[in-house]
Image (cartoon, rainbow, N blue to C red):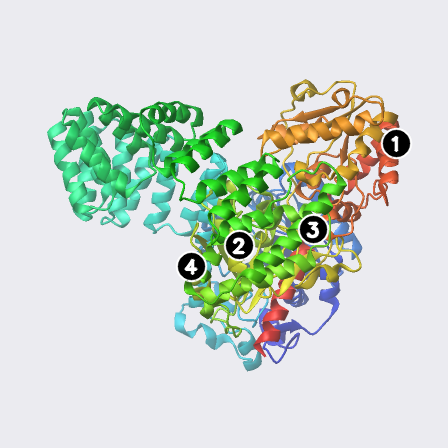
Amino acid sequence: MNYQKFINQLSEVYTTSEKQILLPKSTIFQSVVEKVQGLAIANIMQLLNLAVDCLEEDEIYCEVGCGTGANLIGALLNHSEVTAYAVEQFLVDDADHKIEELVNNLSVFSLEDQVIFSNENFEDFFSELREIQPEQKVGVYFYEGGKDYRSSLLGLLLVKPFLADRALIIVSGSNYSTVQQANWDFLATTPQAKLLLTLPGNEKGNSRFGNGLHIFSWDVNQFTTYDWSQFNKSFRNKPLITALEDFYSEFEFKTKRETLDRLTKEAISLEFNSKALLAEEKYKQVLEWDIYNHKSYHNLGMFYYSQAKYEDALPMLIKSLEIDPGRDSTHYSIGLVLEKLNSTNQAIDAYKKAIVINPEFHDAYNNLGNLLIKTDKIAEAEVIYRQAVAANPNHFGGYLNLGNVLMSLDRVEEAIETYQKALSLNPCNPDIINNLAIAFAANNEQSQSDIHFAYAAYRQGKYQKAINYFQKFFVQEPGELQFYLDFAECYLKTNQYELGIKIFEQAIIQYPNEFVPHLKLIVLRQWLNHIEEAIKIAQQAVAQFPNNLAIKLEQVRLMPILYKDIDEIEVYRSRFIHELNNFINQISLDSQQTKKNTFDALGYNTNFFLQYQGKNDLDIQTKYGQFVHQVMAVNYPEWVKPLQMPPLNTDNKIRIGYISNSMFNHVVANMTIGWLKRQDRNKFKVYSYAIDTAKDSKTIDFQMYSDVFYQIPNNLEAVCQQIINDQLHVLVFLDIGMYAMMTQIGALRLASVQCTTWGHPITSGLPTIDYFLSCELMEPENGAEHYSEKLLKLPNIGLYYEKPLIPETRLERSHFKLRSDAVVYLSCQSLFKYLPQHDYVFAAIAQLVPQAQFAFISSQISEAITEKFKQRLQKAFASYGLNSKDYCVILPRLDGLEYPNVHLVSDIYLDTFSWSGGNTTMTAVASNLPVVTCPGEFMRGRHSYGILKMLGVTDTIATNEAEYIEIAVRLGLDPQWRLAIVEQVKQNQHRVFEDQTCVDALEEFYQRVVQEQSI
């Protein structure tokens, strides 16, 4: 292989733009990129093609890691005389499909006869090649296999016997530290090899070579020694040198850090989701990347500890300690493992070493003390705990443990005093409260014991147990205001609403000058759909507290959660508009007290239920949004000023922030996590701001797919200041309209460009929100008229939505009280989405489909809402001469496997009018259910319509209610047609899930608005 010819001609086949971006002069490679399936980069294809052009006669091209053939095609184009080895080990489950894809790609360019393909790992391939001893030698070798150290080094060593006397070796992945180390070790031990070029990957816009390339010459007649500082002297073409500038050290460090961070986050997420084997493999990958980092060993050791693999954990932790002996946390972790291995004395020594290194290490003190108690060294334990509280006077754990020791020594009053100190530091800790209750009982203070047992149960979510103790305390003496509020909440949590009402009424009597019980009672009556009672209570409260703006605003918002008829919608809509105008017109923001009171009033609730009336809310939302903005402006004048677009940092990445109250297992999180997951980290730096306390596996996903993640709950000022500090280019609000604080924050100017999206598909009405991120397939033609923001329509349904997991475990229909012979129509929306004017649709279907059975899901708000819905169904079915009980099943709230399983036992999915299903419809599609929908006037009534349009299954889209009934009836009576629709859904599912085009469009939007505002 004439590698000198390759080097001399390299600059001739590329061109560089003004921005020094390297591009092939030939356009043929870009056309290949557009035609083949798989990852393809035109620059790399051009490089390989030039290399193959420099082969000598009878030399062969060899590619390890050929995938589905993109680079292979680039190498062989216009080289019909060249034969190639192609090696790839496809996963068993997908091998046939991938091989077919490879063959199809090659056949498009008539290259299939030139390729000898091996579906195996490269070690086996070279082993077999050694047995064959082929005459043809490899002139160009391209390695794109595994990026771990072992694979990278073996990929170079094993090919050596098969190389021509002069050859070119090209290794992909030079940005990876493991690949770099393998390449340097290969060079150090192989004088026949010489580094010719280092081509960096995508960074700073100066090159596009994937994850970077190292290019070596191989010459059996050369003996190379290296002065590493002289590498760049081998570059002779100055324009090419500029285009290929190797910022190796900086980029290697950055890539390594980012990769370690990503792998660690993935490992934590897998562990959190109980995927132990995958998590272990990921932790091991972290270790492979950085074998000299104590954290890598420590993390793997603690993973083994969490899996009760203590024998495996100990050597990992000891290795971590060998690398960094001064780590107090490692000594502590070793102590944990030794405890589990019953090596008590060694564990005690480990904890003591941790304390010596860090005298403020409270967990080490506590564990040491607990271990001393376990070995009956009570006096020593007391000394340790007193040392703990002396070292950490503001940490509750030492006081809790000290209190426990004092109780064991029957020093009860000292224990009570100590527990109370712990409780002052951590007021909601159920262990402290419970132990304090025990201490009060031992001290014969029964009422104090009862109230503390009540709160211990309350904090643990054991509400009925808490009620029992609250009742005992209530009999003995009246409580403070918070006692009544918490007592009532326990009744609400256990659906004992009338008893909860009585407690609030008692609180009003006991504390006549406090407005909070009135506010709580108003909201509770609304939840129970006792709207007239709620209005009456609100009127009385306003009369009693004429200056209380929170009660006045709550009175404005009062409307039924579930309407009895269409006339009631109009009545309460008119009332809301009238009362809101009065409220706003009466507010004067002149005094400091009024400013604060109005701000506080806005923090209780939103206009959430207004949007479910099915009307155009633009004017109302704009009126309210302007008012919220005015209130926030007078309270935070520095945070409403226009902001200049901040400059990019040295990494040239646009900083995108996502803020939400729903970064947990919630429909909003399910809809939007794909944007973060698929965002190009070479172009964007992602910040996430969770303002709720909830944390679950979905929260871990947000952490994993964010470069920076904050959880700052219930603190408006802290989260706003953090956003300001981060100097975002774009801030996206995922769920304005659902939570009061989100609306308040949205009314400020915290980033140059601020967007909201259809986590809550209604205009925010806020003058500080610039764009509404929607989608093409769900917006009507006049969609822009429904928003105060500029409407951005992303392609298709605008979401990168991963296909919901459909369980293998199948529940029977009997589990859901559904008949085995029924045609089951599933309609599983929140009950407040069902407007009364559409109730007759179910009865009309039932009249024509005698075997019909409709499955609904109970209200998550209250049983009273569910009962009201039952009454409406009874009325609708009775008008058709039918009994709703014969046709309708209202299921309890479904968790875990039950929710997807109810889809699997259903036959047809019925969408709601006016407010369509989004997440629910995606689950229906994943379950192969025919979906019947009728698009509404506004985007929020067109979710299923857009999904079906993208799916390409449009026969079940109705244009009106009559056609909706007709389609639903036909699906029920014509099983063959229903099966045909099911097959269409099955075949087309891939169209709606994991759509990258919307992410690409979103990124293009981000880049455009940043550029526009930077000018």
Write down the quadrant of residue 268 in the picture: top left
Q: Earlier in the sequence, mark 3 or mark 4?
A: 3
Q: Earlier in the sequence, mark 4 or mark 2?
A: 4
Q: Position of residue 380 (x, y in %)?
A: 12, 32
Q: Are marks 4 and 2 in contact (CB under 8 Å)?
A: no
Instruction: Please say whether residue 71 is visible from this viewpoint.
Output: no
> Which residue occupies 77% across, 28% down?
875
* Cα separation between marks 4 and 2: 12 Å
* Cα separation between marks 3 and 2: 26 Å
Q: Which mark is residue 574?
A: 3
Q: List the residue tagged with mark 2.
A: 742
Amino acid tagged 1: Arg
Q: Which of 660 and 886 lies nearest the eye of the viewer?
A: 886
Q: In what quadrant of the picture does the C terminus appear?
A: bottom right
Q: Which of 494 and 726 lies nearest the eye of the viewer?
A: 494
Q: In what quadrant of the picture does the N terminus appear?
A: bottom right
Q: Which of 990 and 601 lies nearest the eye of the viewer?
A: 601
* Cα separation between marks 4 and 1: 56 Å
Q: Which mark is residue 399?
A: none
Disc 4 versus disc 1: nearer the observer: 4
